[in-house]
Image (spheres, rainbow, N blue to C red):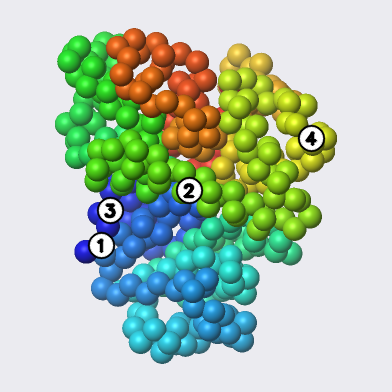
């Protein structure tokens, strides 16, 4: 029995793309383990045929992209290899872990130019690093959309709390929540802050209602992310990247100060920090002095705050006791300070589905 799929804000965006006439291949971007592959597989259920190519597991198919330029010939070879029909308009083709096959990443443009009628989505881990190493990328011929961890609203939907979601959406200063509903949402918000939005941790919590289980999933994710550091860039020691990653968690409450990263000089910190931002694990928040639109006009890149991708990861990295949040009746311990500010920043990021943009404060 397969894992349950939880509704995401990206679902209607993917469905709308599938119905477009002048359709570009879709490149799904974002940090590892945020649910990219699951979202594509869910979309695949609406097609007659679904073909998934995992370039990390199926090394043999790399030759098709290295040998052929024609999308028609590539699809013919893939169809024979997987023993599945690839029919334009009826088949969703998913190139997963595409960073493992640079030739496939480079050939995406040809699918727009020569086989536009085919539904094609590509995704991968550490995709930004693969794109950076390419001499040129298919600008204008590929559509990129971004996926982040679960928002609070998606967390509520995962628990089948559609009625609460509607109340949450409709509440405002003129139409406030009643006290019992407000308290119920506060309780769920506390759970969300602890669990965070990484799909594996959310699934564990939904399945077991155990913070211990969800936190174990988060611990595994953190280890996995740190193991990836050595893949970022050969010239940057993974120990430097881990040092900066840990420092971001410890400096979450204000401007990120390079000098507070022990044993590294400013140049080393900057280099490691840029890699973490590229990987999607760290979200920069830039200060702006603007008092009107556009607020980016007065942005000051020298004053930046760094957020971790997920509140659950943040709390685990600081060994925060979850009971301090769940067992207190004084919600000020949650809605004041760095955790609340981090939550607000991440919710802003997730409020516009599938876009990448800067947070300016």
What residue would you read off at disc 1?
2
Q: Residues within 10 Å of mark 1 (few under 14, many from 20)?
A: few
Residue for point 58% across, 20% down: 253
Residue for point 60% across, 54% down: 228
Q: Gap between marks 1 and 4, in whole Å?
A: 46 Å
Q: How many marks?
A: 4
What residue would you read off at disc 3?
5
Q: Residues within 10 Å of mark 4 (few under 14, many from 20)?
A: few
Secondary structure of residue under mark 4: loop
Mark 2 and mark 3 lie on one chain; the one further toward the N terminus is 3
Callout in the foreground (4, 3): 4
What residue would you read off at disc 4?
263
Q: Residues within 10 Å of mark 3 (few under 14, many from 20)?
A: some
Residue for point 68% across, 37% down: 244
* Quadrant of residue 300 within the rendered picture: top right
User: Do the residues bearing badges 2 and 3 touch, measured as CB atoms within 8 Å?
Assistant: no
Q: Position of residue 72 (x, y in %)?
A: 48, 84
């Amino acid at each position: 029995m397969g894992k349950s799929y939880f509704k995401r804000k990206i679902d209607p965006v993917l469905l709308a793309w599938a119905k477009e006439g002048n359709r570009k291949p879709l490149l799904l971007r974002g940090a590892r383990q945020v649910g990219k592959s699951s979202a594509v597989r869910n979309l695949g259920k609406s097609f007659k045929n679904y073909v998934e190519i995992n370039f990390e597991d199926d090394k043999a198919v790399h030759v098709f992209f290295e040998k052929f330029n024609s999308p028609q010939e590539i699809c013919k070879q893939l169809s024979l290899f997987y023993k599945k029909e690839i029919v334009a308009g009826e088949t969703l083709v998913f190139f997963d872990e595409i960073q493992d096959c640079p030739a496939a990443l480079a050939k995406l443009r040809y699918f727009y130019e020569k086989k536009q009628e085919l539904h094609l989505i590509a995704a991968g881990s550490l995709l930004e690093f693969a794109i950076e190493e390419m001499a040129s990328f298919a600008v204008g011929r590929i559509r990129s959309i971004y996926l982040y961890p679960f928002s609070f609203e998606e967390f509520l939907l995962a628990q089948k709390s559609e009625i609460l979601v509607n109340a949450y959406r409709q509440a405002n200063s003129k139409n406030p929540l009643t006290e019992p509903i407000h308290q119920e949402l506060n309780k769920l918000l506390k759970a969300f802050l602890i669990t965070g939005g990484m799909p594996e941790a959310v699934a564990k919590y939904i399945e077991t209602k155990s913070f211990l289980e969800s936190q174990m999933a988060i611990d595994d994710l953190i280890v996995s992310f740190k193991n990836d550091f050595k893949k970022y860039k050969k010239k940057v020691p993974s120990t430097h990247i881990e040092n900066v990653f840990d420092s971001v968690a410890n400096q979450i409450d204000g401007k990120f100060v390079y000098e507070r990263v022990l044993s590294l000089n400013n140049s080393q910190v900057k280099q490691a920090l840029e890699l973490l931002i590229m990987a999607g694990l760290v979200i920069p928040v830039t200060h702006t002095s603007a008092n009107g639109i556009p607020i980016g006009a007065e942005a000051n890149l020298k004053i930046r705050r760094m957020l971790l991708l997920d509140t659950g990861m943040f709390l685990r990295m600081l060994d925060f006791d979850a009971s301090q949040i769940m067992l207190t009746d004084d919600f000020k311990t949650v809605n004041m300070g760095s955790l609340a500010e981090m939550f607000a920043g991440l919710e802003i990021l997730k409020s516009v589905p599938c876009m990448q943009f800067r947070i300016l404060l």
